[in-house]
Image: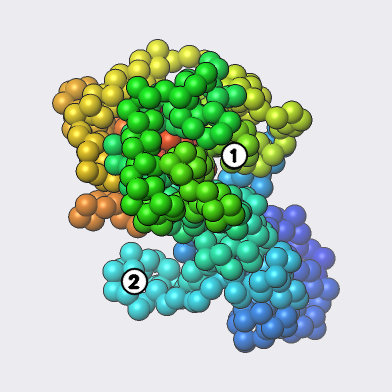
Amino acid sequence: MVIYTVGLGTGTDTTLLGEIASGTGGEFVPAANANALVAIYEEISGGIIDDGTDTDGDGLSDCEEVRGMYSTRGFGSQQPSPNGPIYQPAPRLVTSDPAVADTDGDGLTDGQEMGPALDLRDDPDVAATYAFLVDAGVTKVYNPSSDPNDANSDRDALTDAEERTAGTDAFDEDTDGDGIWDDEEVALAEAGLDLSPTRYDSGPSGIESIRPDRLVVPAGFADGFEWPGGILVIDENFRCSTGSGQDTDDPDCQAIVNYSQDAYVTSGRYDSAFGIINVWCLSFGSCGPTEIESQVLRSWVASQGYFTDEGGLRDSVIRTEALIFCHEFSADAETCTLERYERVQINDEITSQDELIEIATLLAGGVRQPDPEVDSTKSRLQQLCRDAKAAVPRAGKSAQQWGREVHEEFADRIISEGNPRLFPETGYINRGLAQRQGAAWEAGATAPDAVLGDSQAQPKAIFDLKTGTRGIRTSWRTRVRSNLPVGFTDIPLIEIRC
């Protein structure tokens, strides 16, 4: 409850009245005498009673912008810490400048960003859930498309206005969840590759035998590179290679060679059925199997979103992998944010996996003490992951379908372990446990694939399985921490790859 206090005359305890007001979000107003009360009450009522005045013409009343609007999703806020400001979930009450139509200056009015107002009473289930608000007279809730106080709500390289143009989610740096950040997919699409920030891109789907968990690595980066699902090395001409020449014994290389030859025989040039834009063919009219093979691999590298066409790590990969490490090993995991990452100075090009880990160590700002139970659980889950992958046939399935089946097998194997401290997929929402609604979790829930702890409501560490080459999304990590029970928001969040 917001409380406004008025001190009449000189005999009032102004300190106490000020503390009451500021502690509730209200305001303390001194009144020299009774004659001043009418003007004071009129001034206060302007911020409490909504008369519809909209000074800046942004579609939101001055009262709403000053007193706050309830939002269907919480925004983040900058909070002070010894290491600088960190990004934390904020209450779902949003304010903006009533005198400026575009508070954050991103080209969208505050009204456009806040989106349509919803009435809690329109849906009986919603009305029942939020009866405490309805009973208090709060019936209007906004469904924002972006934060009116931040020109880049999800911290990728696209402004909120650019996200609206691209049709992407301004609160999610990877709208389609394919591991490639929206800004990079937009840039790659503009460069001619068949990628979209609103479509899950998983590589050359026409080559079904290729393992989706295998990472395509340029030869210049491959020396000493480790990847749980194994790597496929390509040379500078985008051909399958061991680093010293073509590797015809590798089954994935051979599958690509065979596909390229079949595509050449079938059409003599570019086969659009597999979404590969053969720039070489279009430019020079040369469409032999070798050129098609190079285009297949170039498309695969782009869709994995790990390396650039020139053979270096993508910026989003450096950010994502560093944050994955930070969330697992940091002594204060809640500080593992994009804002903190942006303060780490990276002056040289990243050319090895060791350099990436070094950046992550700097980001962590202090590594947690080893925990034998957490570390042994991670090792056991990695083995269960390998067993699950081996048990699920790959042939004839899309990467997504195969991944879903591996996750189901993984959950069954966790249950079969019979470990009273290890739990399968668990949903969290609003600092508590979420409920399943059929095959899915209730809206707004985040569900890691494994939980270690005294109970699911008292997690010691959480784990999430990734069956492909894409890491845990930054936006998902932020959401899951905001949903975890109070007192458990800084536990290790560990990615399981195998």
| Nearest the eye: 456 or 10 | 456
Q: Which residue is mark 2?
A: 127
Residue 267, x across and y down, in percent: 37, 54
Q: Which residue is mark 1?
A: 308
Q: Earlier in the sequence, mark 2 or mark 1?
A: 2
Q: Is residue 390 above or below residue 201?
A: above
Question: Disc 2 residue type?
Answer: Ala
| Nearest the eye: 44 or 276 | 276
Q: Is 332 situated left or right of 44 in this image?
A: left
Q: For label 2, count other residues whose C-alpha is less than 10 Å away and answer few (under 14), some (14-19) or many (20+).
A: some
Q: For label 1, count other residues whose C-alpha is less than 10 Å away and answer few (under 14), some (14-19) or many (20+).
A: some
| Nearest the eye: 296 or 400 | 296
Question: Disc 1 residue type?
Answer: Thr
Q: How many marks?
A: 2
| Nearest the eye: 134 or 271 | 271
Q: Is residue 218 above or below residue 58?
A: above
